[in-house]
């Protein structure tokens, strides 16, 4: 693992504290500042599942080994790397394949000519792209805080950490002093496999799913309970279930991510419509071969544009469960519907900014997914003031209060940038939930 001394010390110190707690107080794990939490939910379906969103990204720049190590220390059940690929076919952890916002690449004059403009999932994007750099070149870059204006406490870490490979993220999870899952997202799989091109114009033609499976096998990290694979697209998850995972003789829990399920919005099309369905339909590809059985439960397939909202019916959810999915991961704003903007009276938002106002109901999608046999995780809980909401009466809610509303509605797990606070909610929920009665002898 290629890290600088400061990064290694940060990771090693956190893992040493976790190991000490585990050895002293088995079977407990570790939380931030030495607090002890019970054995995580990674090996159990009975407690809320806490996913460290891009690491402990409320405290360290996202997608860094230091951020993932801190998330493990804080008690997260899973760490989440977003995966893109280098020119030489190595998976690395970045939020997007455009790396200008999360690395110091703009400060490297030797890479000035790599800046370009590409069309990714229908959107024109200007910047530097991971696929135009070899891993050796990526190793010369350092991570930066993506939300620098908001998370000023993270900016002193700019330049301290490198860009991790997927193999390094797996190795970190494997070395953890307790079972920790990985929860990778394949970013823009249609772009990388079919549509995208390198800077010189040649096709990329890389299957992120195949590279992901190859790395799981190579790393020996194949416990199905510790591998969740997520995507906003459907075809690559179906390919994983039908072909790639069986061929490798391993299994994993596949999670269907959802964008906006409320409506197809003219100003937010990329978030409302699954890109692979749009792309294959526009090309006239064989949708029945790519999505076996979907037309039977979604008759408009191939005739009209399919939205994420169209994929929330009981019939489609049942199809997902039968064909490939362990669960679904919708946007939390769709699970806790909201309306309007109100001024908040909550100290959590410092009384400064207007907050989105919940309408008081929890989406029936959670119950419908459970009825189909699917788990439900949601993204992303952030404690920063711009991401907070108010209740239906206009009273500001903390991140934890918003989490609790969805847990009360049956939610199985959540992504959060603040794993320590998510773990605290999980522990309170677990203690408040009565144990099922023991069977009579």
Image: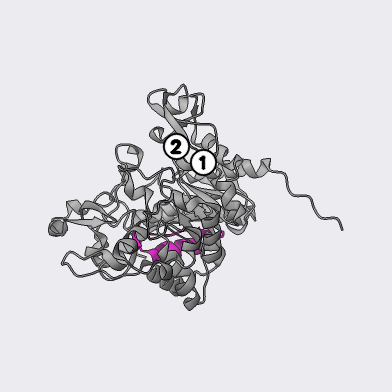
Q: Residues within 10 Å of mark 1 (few under 14, many from 20)?
A: many
Q: Is residue 49 one of those drawn in magenta?
A: no
Marks 1 and 2, how far apart in space? 9 Å
Magenta includes 184?
yes
Mark 2 is surrounded, within 10 Å at the Cα level, by few (under 14), some (14 to 19) or many (20 or more) other residues, namely some
Residue at image mark 1: 421
Residue 201, picture quadrant: bottom left
Whole-percent x, y for residue 271 in the image: 36, 48
Q: Nearer the viewer, residue 60 or 369?
A: 369
Q: Is residue 63 above or below residue 432?
A: below
- Looking at the image, residue 48 sits to the left or right of residue 69; the answer is right
Task: Classify 156 as above or below 120.
Answer: above
Kindly identify the residue that appears in the image at 44 percent across and 51 percent down: 258
Q: Dot 1 lies on which element?
A: helix
Q: In which quarter of the image is the N terminus?
A: bottom left
Is residue 268 something one can see in this rendering?
yes
Q: Which residue is drawn at 21% across and 66% down?
A: 198
* The label number, if any, that marks residue 383 in the structure image: 2
Which one is in front in this view, the residue at disc 1 or the one at disc 2?
Answer: 2
Q: Are marks 1 and 2 in contact (CB under 8 Å)?
A: yes
- Magenta residue span: 164-189
Q: Report if residue 83 is visible in the image.
A: no
């Amino acid at each position: 693992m290629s890290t600088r001394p400061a990064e290694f010390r940060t990771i090693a110190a956190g893992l040493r504290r976790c190991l000490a707690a585990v050895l002293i107080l088995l079977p407990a794990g570790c939380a931030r500042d030495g607090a002890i939490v019970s054995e995580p939910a990674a090996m159990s379906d009975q407690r809320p599942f806490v996913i460290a969103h891009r690491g402990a990204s409320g405290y360290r720049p996202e997608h860094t080994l230091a951020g993932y190590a801190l998330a493990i220390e804080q008690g997260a059940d899973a760490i989440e790397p977003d995966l893109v690929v280098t020119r030489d076919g190595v998976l690395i952890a970045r939020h997007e394949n455009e790396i200008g916002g999360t690395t110091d690449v703009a400060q490297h004059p030797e890479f000035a000519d790599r800046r370009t403009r590409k069309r990714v999932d229908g959107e024109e994007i200007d910047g530097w792209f991971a696929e135009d750099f070899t891993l050796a070149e990526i190793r010369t870059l350092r991570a930066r805080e993506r939300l620098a204006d908001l998370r000023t406490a993270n900016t002193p870490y700019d330049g301290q950490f490198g860009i991790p490979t997927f193999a390094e993220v797996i190795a970190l999870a494997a070395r953890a002093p307790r079972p920790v899952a990985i929860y990778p997202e394949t970013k823009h799989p249609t772009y990388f496999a079919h549509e995208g091109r390198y800077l010189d114009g040649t096709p990329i033609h890389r299957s992120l799913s195949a590279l992901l499976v190859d790395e799981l096998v190579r790393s020996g990290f194949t416990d199905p309970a510790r591998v969740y694979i997520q995507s906003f697209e459907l075809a690559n998850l179906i390919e994983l279930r039908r072909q790639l995972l069986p061929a490798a003789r391993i299994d994993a829990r596949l999670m269907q991510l959802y964008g906006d399920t409320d409506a197809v919005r003219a100003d937010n099309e990329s978030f409302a419509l699954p890109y692979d369905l749009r792309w294959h339909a526009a090309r006239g590809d064989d949708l029945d071969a790519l999505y076996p059985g979907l037309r039977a439960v979604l008759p408009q397939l191939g005739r009209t544009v399919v939205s994420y909202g169209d994929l929330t019916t009981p019939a489609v959810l049942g199809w997902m469960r039968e064909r490939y999915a362990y669960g679904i991961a919708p946007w939390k704003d769709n699970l806790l519907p909201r309306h309007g903007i109100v001024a908040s009276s909550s100290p959590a938002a410092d009384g400064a900014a207007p907050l989105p106002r919940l309408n008081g109901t929890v989406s029936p999608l959670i119950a419908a997914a459970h009825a189909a046999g699917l788990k439900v995780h949601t993204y992303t809980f952030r404690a920063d003031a711009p991401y907070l909401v108010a209740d239906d009466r206009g009273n500001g809610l903390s991140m934890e209060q918003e989490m609790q509303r969805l847990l009360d509605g049956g939610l199985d797990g959540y992504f959060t940038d603040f794993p320590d606070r998510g773990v605290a909610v999980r522990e309170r929920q677990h203690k408040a939930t009565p144990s099922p009665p023991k069977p009579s002898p």
